[in-house]
Amino acid sequence: MKKFQAVYVPVGVPTFHLESAQKMYDGSCALLRKTDKDFVCPDEMLLSIDALRSYLDGVEPDMIVFQNLTFANAAYMGEVLRKFNCPILLWTLREPVIDGTRLRLNSLTGAYSAANTMRSFGVENFGYVFGAPDEDEVVKTVADFVAAARIKFGLRSLKMAAVGHTPTGFGFGRALDSELMSAFGVELEAIEARELINNAKGFSDEECAAFLEKSRCAMCGLEKTPSKNLLDYARLYKAYSDYVEKNGIGALASRCWPDFFTAFGTPVCSVLSMLNDDGIASACEADIYGALSMWIGMKLSGAPVFFGDPVSLDEKENTITYWHCGAAACSLARKDTGATVGVHPNRKIGPAMDFGCEAFENATVFRVGRESDGTFRFFIMEGKALDKPKQFIGTSIVVECENDCRAIVEDSVKDGFEPHFAVIKGHFGNTLEMLADMFGFEVYRY
């Protein structure tokens, strides 16, 4: 598998103040390699078309930082666009000295030239940053852009699974394999829920013992689950884990009701909980785009992501509560209660997770959604997860919004967003906006 490659392209001409340009080049290399230790940088500034061509012949970029160390004409960007089609961050350097004497760099004029060339090539979705390598805004923008480009690259090797079909009335989560491949580069395969149920029924207690023990270590009160449901849960966990491992699945969306209650007698909720802690983004109600949203959030944060419905708002606290029946990762649970186990709130069968989530200072609510014409869009909202107990039977998280919660709900309902969202640890709104721009998707930021 090809390794992600970020490439620095610092161009200029030798007629400007090369001492200033060299200082900017050195600072830029240091910043980029701090952002990504494998960032590819040339051994020296690229001050001619021949030097640029020679350098480009030796790289295979998945993203490019194109920087005008000094002014450079349109031919420099033309060489890049002629060879590569990948996300580009255009970086303009601040003029280092304004003292009434010579213009040292003239980077900004070069940026206009480069951007004009990109538009001529039909490249409209590129990133842009202005400033010196030691400026905080530059540091953050570069880091966010690299993170977004990594996600875009990673999606091309993601294999997802649809376990069963979406229930009637839940078609918003349904996905075609051709759409996922063409829009994101993601591979999607499908398996019937009954296949995994049948596999689970064939396992012995001994074969599932390790899965049961692992669950006991992660959950609180699992021993209160009736013996048959407990053993059937372990069988189901093994069936899902075996399937994921055998087929290289990175994210899945599983049908849950009514099949696992009627055909198996035990819910899949806690299985999905454990899979999320195992690093497999796992959504319920067969919501493929919910699982995709979770996978993106997990890659950005390096932690499991909450998946749920917006079910309540409190204007006084400026909060929205997200809830679902009981599939949240155990590691998200409040430390004072742990990942407690209960029963499904409607079917009264367990095990299903039953806890409030821990607080975290920064939170991003995110959704890969669809417009009415089928095009993709991103829902993005930032806030923080509060220290709140379980709000309803099942798993819940309370998010204090940065903007007015009632307006967010009213606007996003009117905008027709789907009722499932991912709640991510950390603020990633800017990165997600960059990712949407790389794909040419509309952004709804609330």
Image (spheres, helix red, strand yellow):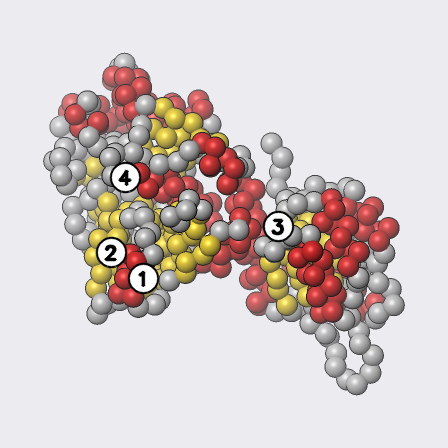
Q: How many neighbours does mark 1 have within 10 angstroms: few (below 14), some (14-19), or many (20 or more)?
A: some
Q: Residue 191: which quarter of the image? A: top left
Image quarter hosting the C terminus: bottom left
Question: Could you tell me which residue is drawn at 21 percent across and 64 percent down?
Answer: 314
Residue matched to label 4: 170
Badge 3: how crowded within 10 Å, few (<14), some, or many (20+)? Answer: many
Would you say residue 210 is visible in this rendering? Answer: no
Q: Amino acid at mark 3?
A: Pro
The residue labelled by disc 1 is 411
Residue 252 point in image, percent of width and height: 38, 34
- Residue 179 to residue 94: above or below: above
Location of mark 2 (residue) = 321
Q: Spatial distance from mark 1 to mark 4, Cα to Cα? A: 21 Å
Instruction: State how far apart marks 2 and 3 are (Cα).
Output: 36 Å
Tell which residue pokes out farthest to the bottom in this image: 100
Q: Which mark is residue 87?
A: 3
Q: Is residue 96 above or below residue 169?
A: below
Q: Amino acid at mark 2?
A: Thr
Is 60 drawn above or below residue 229 in the view shown? Answer: below
Q: Tell me the SS state at disc 1.
A: helix
Residue drawn at point x = 49 percent, y = 56 percent: 433
| Tag nearer the camera, 2 or 1 | 1
Distance in Å between CA atoms under marks 4 and 3: 34 Å
Relative placement, left or right, of 317 versus 112 is left
Q: Whole-percent x and y of residue 94?
A: 69, 72
Image side of residue 132 versus residue 159, left or right: right
Give the Cα separation between the discs numbered 2 and 1: 17 Å
